[in-house]
């Protein structure tokens, strides 16, 4: 079983930056995908970014220019650097782990990002 630990959310002013972290522990395996979705009370869940074990990365539309995902394999941790944040980025960001073997995804507890307008 994989467990995820998230950190890094908070409140920043428009134009500011935040870095989210998501650490995986447990039976990680060699093939997987990790990333983030975000959600607000009034919007559907939206893919933010994801990265495979090979390093292939995919970003949600309109986010690639401001968001960058990276990882530290030695720590089984992925990071999401978010720059030039806008009020529309306010949401709860949920880290996920896809085992890539057809079994269910694992979700983090979520971390809140607030960008006041």
Image: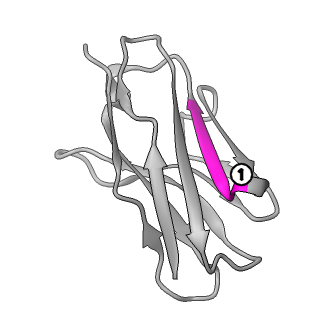
Q: Is residue 14 left or right of residue 81?
A: left
Place of residue 32 in the rendered image (x, y in percent of width and height, measured from the top left): 67, 72
Q: In this view, does 63 lie to the left or right of 106?
A: right
Q: In which quarter of the image is the C terminus?
A: top left
Place of residue 106 in the rendered image (x, y in percent of width and height, measured from the top left): 46, 72
Q: Main secondary structure of the magenta part?
A: strand
Q: Of residues 77 and 39, which is closer to you in this image?
A: 77
Q: Is residue 14 left or right of residue 31?
A: left
Residue at x 39%, y 12% (from the top left corner): 14
Place of residue 81 in the rendered image (x, y in percent of width and height, measured from the top left): 59, 32
Q: What element carries label 1?
A: strand
Q: Of residues 6 and 37, which is closer to you in this image?
A: 6
Residue at x 47%, y 56% (from the top left corner): 5
Q: How crowded is mark 1: few (under 14 residues within 10 Å), some or many (20 or more)?
A: some
Task: Choose top left, top right, bottom left or bottom right for residue 64.
Answer: top right
Does the magenta run of residues contain 1? Answer: no
Residue at x 71%, y 51% (from the top left corner): 57
Place of residue 2 in the rendered image (x, y in percent of width and height, measured from the top left): 53, 75
Q: In this view, does 30 lie to the left or right of 97?
A: right
**Label 1 sits on residue:** 57
Q: Which residue lies furthest to the right in this view?
A: 54
Q: Of residues 105 and 49, which is closer to you in this image?
A: 105
Task: Choose top left, top right, bottom left or bottom right for residue 115.
Answer: top left
The stretch in magenta equals 75-81
Does the magenta run of residues contain 77? Answer: yes
Task: Choose top left, top right, bottom left or bottom right for residue 87.
Answer: top left
Q: Which residue lies furthest to the bottom in this view?
A: 102
1 in relation to 36, above or below? below
Count of marks overlaid on the render: 1
């Amino acid at each position: 079983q994989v467990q995820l630990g998230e950190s890094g959310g908070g409140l920043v002013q428009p134009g500011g930056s935040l870095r989210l972290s998501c650490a995986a522990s447990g039976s990680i395996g060699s093939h997987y995908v990790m990333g983030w979705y975000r959600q607000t009370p009034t919007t559907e869940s939206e893919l933010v970014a994801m990265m495979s074990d090979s390093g292939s990365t995919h970003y949600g539309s309109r986010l690639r220019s401001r968001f960058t995902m990276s990882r530290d394999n030695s720590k089984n941790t992925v990071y999401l650097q978010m720059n030039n944040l806008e009020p529309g980025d306010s949401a709860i960001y949920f880290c996920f782990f896809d085992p890539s073997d057809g079994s269910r995804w694992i979700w983090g507890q979520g971390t809140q990002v607030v960008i006041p307008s």
